[in-house]
Amino acid sequence: MTDFTPLPALAGGVLIGIAVLVLMALNGRIAGISGILGGLLPPAPAQDKGWRIAFLAGLVGAAFLYIAFTGGGIVQSVSSNLTVMTIAGLLVGFGSAMGSGCTSGHGVCGTARLSMRSIAATLTFMATGAIMVFVMRHMVGG
């Protein structure tokens, strides 16, 4: 069972909101991770790569800063099965391409802009996630 940690969750949400706001205000861009990462892959415009690399470096670097400042570790549990991880990654990529964006782009940025497409996508993500949690916990026994 996951511990309920409202203050760290609130702080994280505020930091995400600030990052999204700054990126939109300074670059006019939406902070959807799949779009940011996808813009680094061919055929990406060369003049557009700098902020994308900086954003992703900050995303990864934040974990190291957290460890440096708190002395605590980050506990993350994923499968060690390479086949399962490969299939999962391909499904996430396919879903992100099919949905014209990922959960961060639709859920954080799109709903804030009151985009009907993003609201529908976010409701779909959330419903699918809730159904999978129910299935895994109560039907499969995970």
Image (cartoon, grey):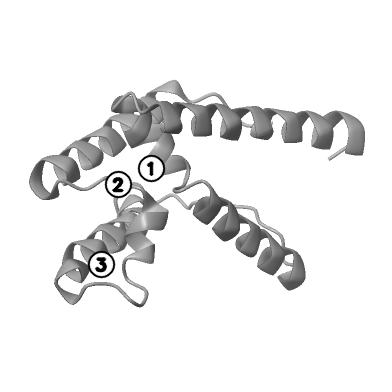
In the image, residue 89 lies at what x, y percent?
61, 62
Label 3 crowd (10 A; few <14 / some 14-19 / many >=20): some
Whether 35 is drawn above or below 114: the answer is below
Q: Dot 1 corresponds to which residue?
A: 105
Mark 3 or mark 1: whose residue is earlier in sequence: 3
Mark 1 or mark 2: whose residue is earlier in sequence: 2
Q: Residue at x 19, y 36 (%)?
A: 21
- Where on the picture, by quarter, is residue 114? top left
What whole-number distance in Å separates the C-alpha atoms at marks 1 and 2? 6 Å
| Circle nearer the viewer, 2 or 3 | 2
| Circle 3: element type | helix
What whole-number distance in Å separates the C-alpha atoms at marks 3 and 1? 17 Å
Q: Residue at x 67, y 59 (%)?
A: 88
In the image, residue 3 lies at what x, y percent?
58, 28
Q: Dot 2 corresponds to which residue?
A: 31
As rendered, which of 58 and 45 lies closer to the eye?
45
Whether 13 is drawn above or below 63: the answer is above
Left or right, 39 with respect to 142, comes to: left
Q: Are marks 1 and 2 in contact (CB under 8 Å)?
A: yes
Q: Amino acid at mark 1?
A: Gly
